Image (spheres, helix red, strand yellow):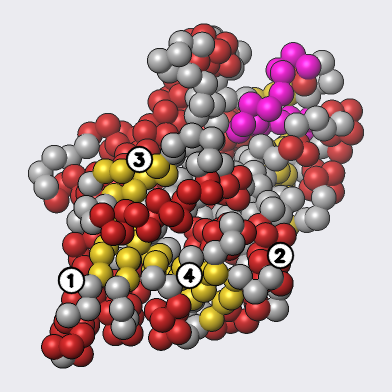
């Protein structure tokens, strides 16, 4: 099939590359000319395991092209997939300007039937606004254009950063919100290669599909915040949240996924989607008190490591240098949007400390963010990071942090102390190396 992807961010680039890998001819459109040049030069602007090989393979095969030509992109694909960003507005609602601009571009240039697929995370009712934007552009073109037919469907993505290629190639479900049989048939054809061994496509109304995406992220965020609050309680009561996690996770009604206590969640999805869903609920007079509590709990949790450090060294950290392992909001990505590391660094700087930080892949992004802050140093190895520092804080659970040389850490740190925001280690094993250990929710 001929498919157009509008937007080459995480969702658009992964979607386009993976669809091309299944034999489709994919035209990826982006208004950012510099990004398109980088992609055409073989440079991948994001870190996502496995993505570079898929992109290069399909570019070489001629099945994947990148361009800023809107008219050509609309001519190319009967399927027009909108995968642009929906950043939070000032009130927390999703900013739809890029989605509606993409819809308008389709309306200006379409010359035959088109299926417009909303893959961006958008509030319930966005399909109606996209339909209106396309119709408005067709009306501007006159009577002949208004006769052109099109459909608008919802096809939200459920890709995890750091595992997005695998998630796309082996989806656990494919949500399609459509009330048009012709559009539904085309999407079934598009996704047929991804469900050879069992039916994964779930057909529902457009509005239900739009809500499903928000509901999924809100549920996962709720589990994280709930466990973080339990962890803080466990710490006060002398219980171990890891033992509690195993106890409740063994209940099949609960399960183990997203039950890990830590330093809070971040990234481009959970924080903004929790806020956007709350905003939608407020607009229709049905506020979601649970999600408001989830957001509050997460903001508190991002401060927990700094509180522990100040409790150990005193309210003023002037003259202290804290080593920090992990800057990305999660492993296997260089995404630092709303990362817990940002909150921790801000707290440490406000208390007078300086920071030396290391991340396996997010160093360039961190150097960009902190380019004007002389008290934040980004280094190129984990062991260089701790040398001469007063303590080590762990914020992201990268594989290379899971089994460090504790004896070397004890020698390198001025005060052998680890503040573990991801509960990577066995407390007794760390303390056996004469290192003070401060995990999350593991008693005293």
Mark earlier in primary sequence (1, 4): 4
Pointers 3 and 2 in contact (CB under 8 A)?
no
Please say if 265 is above or below 31: above
For disc 3, the marked residue is: 202
In percent of width and height, residue 319 lies at: 70, 48
- Give me the C-alpha separation between circle 1 and circle 4: 25 Å
The structure residue drawn at horizontal position 46% and vertical position 10%, both measured from the top left corner, is 251
The structure residue drawn at horizontal position 78% and vertical position 17%, both measured from the top left corner, is 429
In percent of width and height, residue 300 lies at: 43, 36
Pointers 2 and 4 in contact (CB under 8 A)?
no
For disc 1, the marked residue is: 132
Mark 4 or mark 3, which is nearer to you?
4
- Give me the C-alpha separation between circle 3 and circle 2: 30 Å
In percent of width and height, residue 198 lies at: 48, 34
Mark earlier in primary sequence (1, 3): 1
Q: In this view of the protein, which residue sits in the foreground, 210 or 1?
A: 1
Q: Is residue 47 visible?
A: no
Mark 2 or mark 1, which is nearer to you?
2
Pointers 4 and 3 in contact (CB under 8 A)?
no
Mark earlier in primary sequence (3, 2): 2
> Which range is magenta?
415-429
Please say if 56 is above or below 292: below
Pointers 2 and 1 in contact (CB under 8 A)?
no
Q: Secondary structure at mark 2?
A: helix
- Give me the C-alpha separation between circle 2 and circle 4: 18 Å
Q: Secondary structure at mark 3?
A: strand
């Amino acid at each position: 099939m001929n498919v157009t992807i509008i937007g080459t961010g995480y969702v658009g680039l992964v979607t386009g590359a993976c669809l091309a890998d299944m034999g489709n001819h994919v035209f990826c459109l982006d208004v950012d000319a510099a990004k398109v040049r980088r992609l055409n030069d073989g440079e991948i602007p994001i870190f996502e395991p496995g993505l570079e090989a898929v992109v290069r393979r399909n570019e070489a095969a001629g099945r994947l092209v990148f361009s800023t030509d809107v008219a050509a992109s609309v001519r190319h694909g009967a399927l027009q997939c909108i995968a642009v960003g929906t950043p939070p507005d000032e009130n927390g609602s999703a900013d739809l300007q890029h989605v509606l601009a993409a819809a308008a571009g389709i309306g200006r240039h379409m010359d035959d039937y088109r299926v417009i697929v909303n893959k961006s995370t958008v509030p319930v009712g966005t399909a109606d606004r996209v339909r209106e934007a396309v119709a408005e552009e067709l009306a501007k073109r006159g009577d002949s254009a208004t006769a052109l037919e099109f459909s608008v469907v919802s096809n939200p993505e459920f890709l995890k950063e750091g595992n997005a290629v695998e998630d796309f190639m082996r989806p656990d479900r494919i949500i399609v919100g459509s009330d048009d049989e012709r559009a539904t048939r085309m999407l079934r054809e598009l996704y047929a290669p991804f469900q050879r061994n069992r039916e994964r496509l779930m057909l529902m109304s457009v509005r239900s599909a739009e809500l499903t995406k928000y509901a999924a992220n809100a549920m996962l965020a709720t589990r994280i915040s709930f466990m973080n609050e339990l962890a803080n309680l466990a710490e006060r009561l002398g219980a171990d949240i890891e033992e509690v996690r195993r106890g409740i996770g063994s209940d099949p009604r609960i399960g183990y996924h997203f039950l890990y206590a830590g330093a809070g969640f971040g990234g481009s999805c959970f924080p903004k989607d929790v806020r956007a869903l709350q905003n939608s609920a407020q607009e229709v007079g049905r506020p979601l008190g649970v999600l408001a509590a989830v957001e509050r709990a997460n903001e508190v949790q991002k401060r927990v490591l700094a509180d522990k450090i100040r409790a150990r060294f005193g309210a003023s950290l002037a003259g202290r240098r804290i080593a920090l392992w992990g800057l990305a909001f999660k492993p296997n990505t260089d995404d630092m949007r709303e990362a817990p590391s940002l909150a921790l660094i801000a707290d440490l700087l406000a208390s007078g400390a300086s920071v030396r930080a290391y991340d396996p892949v997010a160093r360039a992004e961190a150097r960009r963010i902190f380019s004007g802050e002389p008290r934040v140093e980004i280094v190129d190895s984990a062991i260089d990071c701790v040398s001469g520092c007063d303590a080590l804080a762990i914020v992201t659970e990268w594989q290379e942090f899971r089994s460090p040389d504790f004896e070397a850490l004890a020698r390198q740190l001025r005060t052998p102390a680890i503040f573990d925001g991801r509960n990577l280690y066995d407390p007794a094993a760390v303390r056996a190396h004469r290192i003070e250990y401060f995990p999350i929710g593991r008693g005293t």
